[in-house]
Image (tube, rainbow, N blue to C red):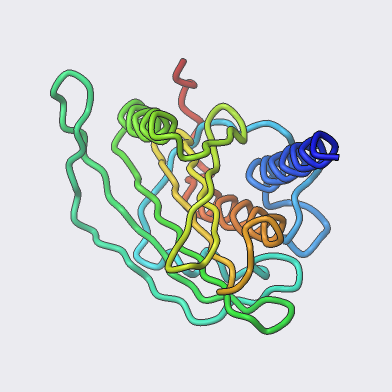
């Protein structure tokens, strides 16, 4: 029985990761309400050129956070001042950060939380380096890293007893971190499907909203 339940849990986790990859990679086009990904889209998007915004929360208001959920109060956290990162070979690349903290209401009226932070770099290579360093650290510390696709991964997290999930995504000159937290008293296992749907939708909308659609995609970094 133990082996059977372990196999079922692995299958559930695999299905959740596939669903998250679908939501992350799907474009904004489609005939649904924007709360579901396209099952045909299982690959990461082409690298893009992105711009900083002072109103990141507006990027999340076009559709519900997930099926059955509604967006509550939101708080923009955006500074136009450039920051310096630690790059390869002593280089200190500059980037600007913008983010949104939001309250969500679930189908049963319970409150969930969402936090999305975008770091827009001056070039793709420093963004790639920052993403890979964070990925290596999360893997080295055994934080339960699960690959979504080659340029995105998810891991379990917790905030004051709220079970949650965090998604990290790299695309071109952008590094995006999205975290979602379920209500107190729930478990990560029972909230997993909704958490992944919230993460995937928020990441897709933030990336697409910050993307300059009139600028050709840069050459992918190996």
Q: Is residue 74 above or below residue 199?
A: below
Image check: 214 left or right of 198? left
> What residue is rendered at 81% in x and 60% in y?
32
The vertical placement of 53 against 217, above or below, is: below
Front residue of 8 and 37? 8
Residue 94, horizontal then vertical, whole percent = 21, 40
Tell me where residue 121 sits by quadrant.
Answer: top left
Residue at coordinates 56% horizontally, 27% vertically from top-left? 150
* Residue 124 image offset from top left, x and y in percent: 37, 30
Q: Which quadrant is the N terminus positioned in?
A: top right
Residue 31 in the image, given as x and y percentages of width and height: 83, 57
Where does residue 113 sit, x and y in percent of width and height? 52, 70
| Farthest residue, direction bottom | 109
Task: Determine the residue positioned at 81% across, 42% down.
Answer: 5
Q: Quadrant of residue 104?
A: bottom right
Figure quadrant of residue 199: bottom right
């Amino acid at each position: 029985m133990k082996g059977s339940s372990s196999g079922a849990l692995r299958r559930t986790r695999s299905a959740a990761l596939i669903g998250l990859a679908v939501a992350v990679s799907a474009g904004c086009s489609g005939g649904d309400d924007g709360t579901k990904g396209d099952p045909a889209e299982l690959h990461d998007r082409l690298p893009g050129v992105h711009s900083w915004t002072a109103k990141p929360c507006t990027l999340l208001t076009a559709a519900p956070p997930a099926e059955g959920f509604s967006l509550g109060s939101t708080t923009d956290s955006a500074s136009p001042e450039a920051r310096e990162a630690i790059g390869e070979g002593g280089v200190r690349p500059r980037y600007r950060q913008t983010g949104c903290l939001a309250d969500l209401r679930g189908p049963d009226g319970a409150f969930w939380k969402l936090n999305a932070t975008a770091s827009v770099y001056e070039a793709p290579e420093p963004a790639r380096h920052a993403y890979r360093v964070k990925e290596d650290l999360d893997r080295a510390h055994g934080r339960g890293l699960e690959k979504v696709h080659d340029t995105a991964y998810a891991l379990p997290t917790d905030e004051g007893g709220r079970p949650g999930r965090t998604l990290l995504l790299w695309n071109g000159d952008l590094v995006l971190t999205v975290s979602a937290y379920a209500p107190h008293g729930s478990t990560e296992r029972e909230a997993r499907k909704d958490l992944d749907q919230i993460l995937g939708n928020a990441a897709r909308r933030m990336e697409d909203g910050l993307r300059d659609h009139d600028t050709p995609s840069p050459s992918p970094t190996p």
